[in-house]
Image (cartoon, rainbow, N blue to C red):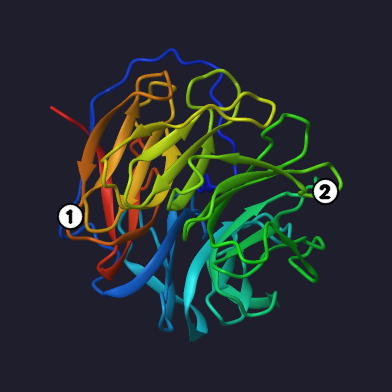
Amino acid sequence: MKLLCSVSATFILFTSVVGSAEPRGFVGGSRLMLGTQVNLSASVRVGDLDDDDDLDVVVANGRHWPQQNYVLLNQSRGRFNVQRPLGRELRTTYATELADLDGDGDLDIAVGNDMAPNQVFLNDGAGQFQPGETFGEPSSVRSLTLADLDGDQDVDIVATSRGKPNMFYLNGGKAGFANGQPFGGPDDSTISVAVADLNQDGHNDLVLANRDGQPNYALLNDGRMNFDRKVSFGTSRDETRAIAIGDMNGDGKPDLIAGNIGQPNAVYLGDGAGGFQQGVPFGRPDGQTYAVTLADLDHDQKLDIVVGNVMQSNGVFFNDGSGVAFSEVRFGNEDGASYGLDVGDLDGDGFDDIVVANSGSTNRIFLNRRRR
C-alpha cells in the first residue's frame, strides 16, 4: 500500500459535512525533529517510500545556495532514525515532489532546482533512489506540482518559475519528460500552482499564485492542453505565495485557498463553472504565509487549513463547515521561517500530523493530539 499525503495537485472533496469534531492541538518537542542539521529547507513531502505501510519524509534543501536533499525513513510511530541523501550532487532545490512517475507501483521523486538541472529520482521499491532523466532547462524554479494534465493516466510535472516562463512536462509513460510547454505569461512571478478541474468539464485546470504585484489567475484547459482562458481572482495586487484547492463548504465545487504575504490569507468559493466569489479573509492582517495545505485534522468531515509562516507562528484553521469561518490553533515558534509543510499520519494513531520545513532552523514534526 502506497500512502501519499501531498494535496497540492488534488481537489479534495467530502460528500458529507456531518461529523463530530474533537478539539485538537499540535505537540512538538526536542525529539520531534528531522535530524539536528540546520539547512535552508524549502519544502517537505510525506509518503510511504519503502513499502512498509508508514509515512516517510523527503526534504528539499538549498534556497539560494546548493545543499543536500534527504530522505528520512519512518521506523514506526513517527521515529525517523534512518536518513539517506537524495542524489550525489548538492543543488539549489526548492521542491521534492512524490508520485509514481514510471508506473511500477512505488513513489518516485521529482526535484525542482533554482538555475540548476531538474531531475527525476526513481525508487527501487525499498526507498533507495537512482537518478533518472533530467527535465527542462535550468530556470528560477520555485515549485513543482505533479498531476495528470492530459488524461492519459500517468503523472505529469508542472513547474513554476519566478520571473521566467512556467512550464509543464508531459510524461511519456516511463518517467520521461521530453518537451516542456509554457503556460501563463512569460514574465509571471509564479511561486505555486495547484491543479484541479475547476469547471467540471473533465479536464484539469491550473491555478497560479503570483507575487511581485502580479494578479493571481486560473487557466482553464480546453481539453486539448491549451490553457488560454484566464479567470482572475483576488485584488490584482495580492502578494500570494501559496495556493491550495479543496471543497471547503461541502457543495461539491472546488474552492481556492490563498496564502499571502503582508496581508490576510483568503478563501475563494468556487461556482463550479471556473469562477470564484470575492475572497473572504482569514488569519492575521499582517500575515506572512509561505505554505498552505488542507486536511481533515479533527475528523469532522470538513477540510481544515494548515499554514506555514515566516517570523510568525504557524497555524491550523479549523473549518466550521461554511468554508469561510475558522477557529485558529497556533503551533511552532514566532521567529521561525517555515517555507514548506505537509500532513500525514506519522505515528499511526489515525490523525494527520504536520511536518514543517524551516529555513535556517531544524525541520520539525508536530503530532496531532486531543486537547484537554
Between 99 and 272, the one nearer to me in the picture: 272
Estimate how packed mark 2 is, as few (under 14), some (14 to 19) or many (20 or more) residues with alpha carbons within 10 Å.
few
Q: Which mark is residue 333?
A: 1
10 w.r.t. 209: above or below: above
- Residue at x 80%, y 49% (from the top left corner): 150
Query: Left or right: where does residue 179 sit relative to residue 310?
Result: right
Between 55 and 148, the one nearer to me in the picture: 148
The local secondary structure at tag 1 comes to loop
Residue kind at label 1, given as amino acid type:
Asn
- Residue at x 78%, y 31% (from the top left corner): 201
Residue 224 is situated, as x and y percent measured from the top left of the image, at: 87, 47
Q: How far is disc 1 from disc 2 in space, using C-alphas?
A: 44 Å
Say which label, 1 or 2, has the lower sequence index.
2
Query: Left or right: where does residue 264 sit relative to residue 123?
Result: left
272 w.r.t. 97: above or below: above
Residue 163 is situated, as x and y percent measured from the top left of the image, at: 56, 69
Between 93 and 227, the one nearer to me in the picture: 227
Q: Quadrant of residue 61?
A: bottom left
Name the residue at the right extreme: 224
Which residue position is annotated with label 2?
Answer: 152
Name the residue at the top extreme: 18
- Residue at x 77%, y 39% (from the top left corner): 203
Q: Quadrant of residue 353?
A: top left
Cβ atoms at labels 1 and 2 below 8 Å apart? no
Q: Is residue 61 visible?
A: yes
256 w.r.t. 287: above or below: above
